[in-house]
Each structure stands twice: as structure tokens, then as C-alpha cells.
């Protein structure tokens, strides 16, 4: 059981380049999330998807777009990368069985370390 | 002001001691509380969660919740150097989309 799988693990971009971070979960979770983690800032929510077909902005959505492709997959796109987007990105999912509840813990992927020069 | 507050540390304890990590939250609608451990360069992993006031024990870990005072704590008994990591507190509130809010984490160092 793979859990939450993120690709790529590392990426270096030049300013202005675009890329898509991929995330897939095999736990039949309804909810999926994208966080970024910067030193001293903790985990900050970029976007989330409470169910297939829905996405909503989190705390720091500017410069990002997301797609909930199906129940398993939730991708994060940087259309024009900026040095301020250098960070570690985590995808997470939650849901007790197929239904997310307030008591459901998040399960995290291994992260993508992105550097924008 | 962040809704979930943690002392950034580092908290340094000797091997074998009890490490006490604290977390306060501002939203009285918060219903469930999670502790994650994050080793340097790794992703957060769930240690335990608590929903009801009082204590919940799991091996060397005890979570304590006091909703009236709006704090949750994690005690680690018989601390080991392998417990050295950053500990993240997360809170989910009832109603709406249950978006979890994370504290910034407390760095724990257990020295031999």
C-alpha cells in the first residue's frame, strides 16, 4: 500500500518556467491538500480539494493552480515560477474510508523540494 | 496571529527524561487534535490524535487535552535520541470543510 505518492522528489527551475507537481493516493480518501513548508513558517495550505471535482484556495494560493483529476490524483501547477516559490511542497490526503470527517488525520507524501533560481 | 501556537524551541532534554510539548489554539470550535513528528528532510508522520478532554496514552506518548484552557500537550516518556525531531500540532474544527490548521512546530533535541 503506497499511501500518498508525490513526484518529482527534487526539481530546479529557472524563473518564469512552469511545472506540475503530481500527487496520487490509493487510500480512497475524499480530501486532498497541497502545503508548502518554509523554515520558520510551518505548513501553509496552498489549495485543497474536499471531493472530486471541487477545489478551494487555502492560505497562500497566489502563483499556483490545481487540478483534481479524479479521486486519486491532485496536481499543483506553477505557471511562471518565482524565487519566492522555492520551498518544500507536501501533498496530503484524509478521509475515514471514503468519507472525510473532523476526526480524520492527514497522510502526507514524501515531499517535493523545489528550487527556483 | 497564527491560530495554533507552539514554542519553536529547541527543547533540549536528556535521554530518559520526559519531554513535554505544548500547543495552544484560539478557535473554540476546534474539535480534534493531532500530533505529528517530522524528522529533518522528511515528511510529517502521525503520532497520535485526541478528541476528548483528558489524557490518551499510546506507548511512550501521552496526549493531554484541555478544551476549557484551549491547549493540548504531548508527553514523551523515556525520551530517546531517536525522538529528536520537530513536533507539529494540528487542529481540525467541526463544521465546514474541516480544514486542518498546523502550528509551526517545536524542535526537540534529546541528548545522550
Image (tube, grey):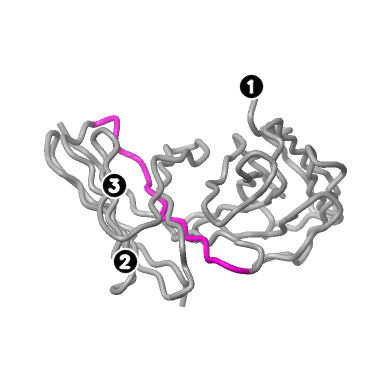
The residue located at (15%, 31%) in the rendering is B112
Snapshot quadrant of residue B57: top left
The residue located at (67%, 47%) in the rendering is A99
Please give the range of residues in magenta: B81-95
Q: How far apart are marks 1 and 3 (CA)?
A: 28 Å
- Label 3 marks a residue whose chain is B
> Which-is-in-front pick, marks 2 and 3?
3
The image position of residue B87, as x and y in percent, is 37, 48
First in sequence: mark 2 vs mark 3: 3
Q: Can you identify the residue that label 1 sits on?
A: A1
Q: Can you identify the residue that label 3 sits on?
A: B56
Name the side, left or right, on which B81 lies relative to A77.
left
Q: Can you identify the residue that label 2 sits on?
A: B71
Magenta stretch holds residue B94: yes
The image position of residue B67, as x and y in percent, is 33, 69
* Whether labels 2 and 1 share one chain: no
**Could you tell me which secondary element the residue under label 1 belongs to?**
loop
**Could you tell me which secondary element the residue under label 2 belongs to?**
strand
Q: Distance between the residues labelled 2 and 1?
A: 35 Å
Q: Main secondary structure of the magenta part?
A: strand
Name the side, left or right, on which B6 lies relative to A74.
left
- Label 2 marks a residue whose chain is B
Number of other residues with Cα within 10 Å of mark 3, as a class: few under 14, some 14 to 19, many 20 or more? some
Number of other residues with Cα within 10 Å of mark 1, as a class: few under 14, some 14 to 19, many 20 or more? few
Amino acid at each position: 500500500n503506497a499511501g500518498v505518492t508525490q513526484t518529482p522528489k527534487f526539481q530546479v527551475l529557472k524563473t518564469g518556467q512552469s511545472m506540475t507537481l503530481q500527487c496520487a493516493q490509493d487510500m480512497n480518501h475524499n480530501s486532498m491538500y497541497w502545503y508548502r513548508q518554509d523554515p520558520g513558517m510551518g505548513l501553509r495550505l496552498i489549495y485543497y480539494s474536499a471531493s472530486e471535482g471541487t477545489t478551494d484556495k487555502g492560505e497562500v494560493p497566489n502563483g499556483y493552480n490545481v487540478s483534481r483529476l479524479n479521486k486519486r490524483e491532485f496536481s499543483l501547477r506553477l505557471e511562471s515560477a518565482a524565487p519566492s516559490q522555492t520551498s518544500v511542497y507536501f501533498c496530503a490526503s484524509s478521509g475515514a474510508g471514503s468519507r472525510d470527517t473532523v476526526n480524520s488525520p492527514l497522510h502526507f507524501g514524501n515531499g517535493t523540494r523545489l528550487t527556483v533560481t | 496571529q497564527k491560530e495554533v501556537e507552539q514554542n519553536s524551541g529547541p527543547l533540549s532534554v536528556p535521554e530518559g527524561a520526559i519531554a513535554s510539548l505544548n500547543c495552544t489554539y484560539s478557535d473554540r470550535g476546534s474539535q480534534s487534535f493531532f500530533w505529528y513528528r517530522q524528522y529533518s528532510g522528511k515528511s510529517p508522520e502521525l503520532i497520535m490524535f485526541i478528541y476528548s478532554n483528558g489524557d490518551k496514552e499510546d506507548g511512550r506518548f501521552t496526549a493531554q487535552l484541555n478544551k476549557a484552557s484551549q491547549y493540548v500537550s504531548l508527553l514523551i516518556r523515556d525520551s530517546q535520541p531517536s525522538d529528536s525531531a520537530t513536533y507539529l500540532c494540528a487542529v481540525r474544527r467541526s463544521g465546514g470543510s474541516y480544514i486542518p490548521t498546523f502550528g509551526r512546530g517545536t524542535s526537540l533535541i534529546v541528548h545522550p
